[in-house]
Amino acid sequence: MANIEIRCADWQATVTLNRPEVRNAFNDEVIYELTKAFQELGSREDVRCIVLAGNGPAFCAGADLNWMRRMAGYTHRENFSDAAALAEMLRVIYRCPKPTIARVQGDVYAGGMGLVAACDVAVSVDSAQYCLSEVKLGLIPATISPYVVRAMGARAAHRYFLTAERFGAAEALRIGFVHQVVRAPDLDQAVGALVRNLVQAGPQAVSLCKRLVHEVAERDITPDLIASTVRSIADIRVSPEGREGIQSFLDKRRPGWLPAD
């Protein structure tokens, strides 16, 4: 059985964690495959949106137990290398030039929280449970922390990093960790609506908007930041896609990046 499944159609790629027997827990092989998948899909012109999903009852339970048993005997150097690979996977997902959606169909624990947080948008079923359980094992959620703290905010992170409490989808929505909570039968419809919005927008503009959020978030509004945003809008206005988007709007026709009716 493949660790992940990849399906591409209609400008959308779906990357599905496929280890339901271990609640989609990841190990070094899964980390390598996810990193490679997002690198390759991020460079494909026929892909404008990537959905990260999971097979089975859980979205991702964090680290695989057999992998953890091996790590228990690692040296500091081996642990450093191992953690670096996980950090690179999360960075690749977070920095992927294509917009990403976490389709959360079940529980999310520990490192799985990093996968959800690294995606641009997260949609969760109302029955999903969330937990940052690392301190119960005498560990810390260090590698996933840059993404999880950005997603839920520092105040919520103080509580859930320290207490390792489980919390439900409603709480995940309240603290901003996920964007939408739906009933299980409505999950695909909710994700599909987001995908349609993403693939209909200018692909270059969407990629640059994603980079814009990364560059602007939590920065002071300084003259340098303002100058950077001025350059960004000037650049996109004179780009082929920007010119086509404006002209198609004025001509009341579909832009060239969408198929004709």
Image: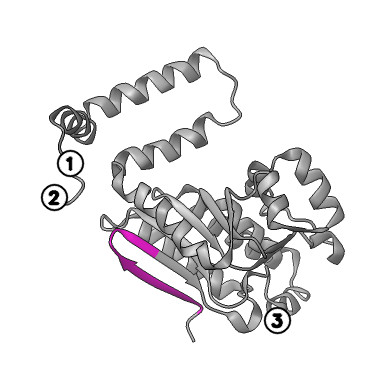
Position of residue 72 measured from the top left corner of the image (x, y, whole percent): 78, 74
Q: Which label's residue is closer to the chain start, 1 or 2?
A: 1
Q: Amino acid at mark 1?
A: Arg
Position of residue 107 measured from the top left corner of the image (x, y, whole percent): 67, 67
Query: How busy is the neighbourhood of tag 3: few (under 14 within 10 Å), some, or many (20 plus)?
Result: few
Q: Disc 1 designates what residue?
A: 254
Which residue is drawn at the image coordinates 62% and 84% (left, top)?
21
Position of residue 121 measured from the top left corner of the image (x, y, whole percent): 52, 50
Instruction: Provide the secondary structure element on which disc 2 rests.
Output: loop
Determine contact: label 1, label 2, CB under 8 Å: yes
Which residue is drawn at the image coordinates 45% and 67% (left, top)?
15
- As drawn, the label of residue 26 is none
Residue 168 in which image quadrant: bottom right
Q: Main secondary structure of the magenta part?
A: strand
122 versus 215 height, above or below: below
Instruction: Provide the secondary structure element on which disc 1 rests.
Output: loop
Q: Nearer the viewer, residue 68 or 148?
A: 148
- Disc 1 versus disc 3: distance between alpha carbons? 52 Å
Q: Amino acid at mark 2?
A: Ala
Q: Disc 3 designates what residue?
A: 66
Query: How busy is the neighbourhood of tag 2: few (under 14 within 10 Å), some, or many (20 plus)?
Result: few
Which residue is drawn at the image coordinates 42% and 21% (left, top)?
228
Determine contact: label 1, label 3, CB under 8 Å: no
Query: How busy is the neighbourhood of tag 1: few (under 14 within 10 Å), some, or many (20 plus)?
Result: some
Q: Provide the residue span drawn in magenta.
A: 3-13
Instruction: Provide the secondary structure element on which disc 3 rests.
Output: helix
